[in-house]
Amino acid sequence: MGNSRFLGEYGDSEDQNGVSFALSSLVGSFWNRKWRQLKMGVTRKGAGGGGGRAWYQRKRVKGVIGLVGLYFLVNWFLLLRLHDLRGVTFHHQDRSFHNSSFTSVSVEGKWRKLTKGKRLQKGPYDRMLALAAHALAENKHEPKDLWQEPFVTASAWRPCSDQRNWVSSGGNNGYIMVTANGGMNQQRVAVCNAVVIARLLNSTLVIPTFMYSSVWKDVSQFRDIYQEEHFINYLIPDIRIVKELPEELRSLDLEAIGSIVTDADIRKESKPSFYVKNILSILPKNRVMHFIGFGTRLAFDPIPFQ
């Protein structure tokens, strides 16, 4: 059997067992010899009656107490020696680990200084920080492809909002109205899609309205969340935006003329070709199209660059 991982080169567990066995044998032989002597003494003093028996009982109790005490003393000695040897074995491991853990301790110390007096919240950031500290402690370098986009399609995206080389849409085909449903994020997506549809159909966008939801219980409208004037002015190079319909169109019965479009009429993430084929064909005639709900009803691809 090989060396124990706890004792290493400083000792072997079998040696300790051998010492324990030798001591036990020595104690056993001593006790047997004492037992025979006591038995012979009792036999000789048998005529003495009760006094000899009482003396034998006292000797027996003392012998048992001494034997138990000796047993615990030997075990205590062996355990103490084993503990000292384990301490010597792991001493060199502690010294080798000290250098690698120094970096981790320094990172942790800096983090404590930065966050002193602040209440830390457990979350992804804390887990990432712990992983970073662990990597520094092990002197691991970051992979070369860490910041590379793993998906080829996603890597093809390029910023283009500051590269406008097209003329503004005149909005001559009619007006687009949107009543967005859902929470704030769904409403934000609906507003972005409305801007794209207005540009795609060469139409004028009316400032979107938000549908009241019994779940969110929020009565806020576009003007309560966003800056209307900034929204209108910023998108002037792209589309035409108005705050409300012209007065001559407000009295139209949109449902009667077929200008109401709900989510049931449009499949989720429909392609731009759907709007060109189905909406653009009736928008110039009705002059107004009202999209109700409009939750993720426009696909991201393939959208024309302009």
Image (spheres, rainbow, N blue to C red):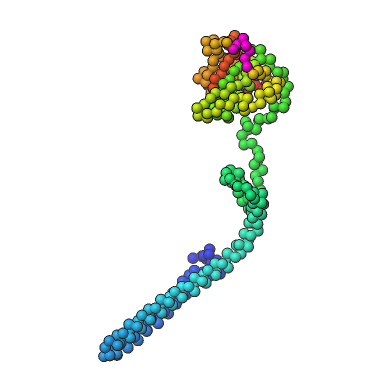
Q: Quadrant of residue 43?
A: bottom left
**Horizontal and vertical percent position of residue 301:** 60, 25
- Asked whether residue 249 is drawn in magenta, I would say yes
Is residue 118 in view from this perspective? yes
Would you identify the image quadrant in which residue 180 lies? top right
Residue at 29% across / 85% down in the picture? 53
Residue 265 x, y percent position in the rendering: 52, 18
Residue at image coords 66%, 26%: 227
Point 65% across, 57% down: residue? 102
**In-front residue for pair 199/113:** 113
User: In the image, residue 272 lies at what x, y percent?
Assistant: 60, 20
Query: How many labels, in total?
Result: 0
Determine the residue positioned at 52% across, 21% down.
Answer: 263
Q: Which residues are magenta?
A: 244-250
Q: Is residue 166 above or below residue 99?
A: above
Q: Position of residue 45 (x, y in %)?
A: 29, 90
Camera-side residue of 144 and 136: 136
**In the rendered image, the vertical position of residue 120 relative to residue 21, given as above or below:** above
For the C terminus, give its image quadrant: top right
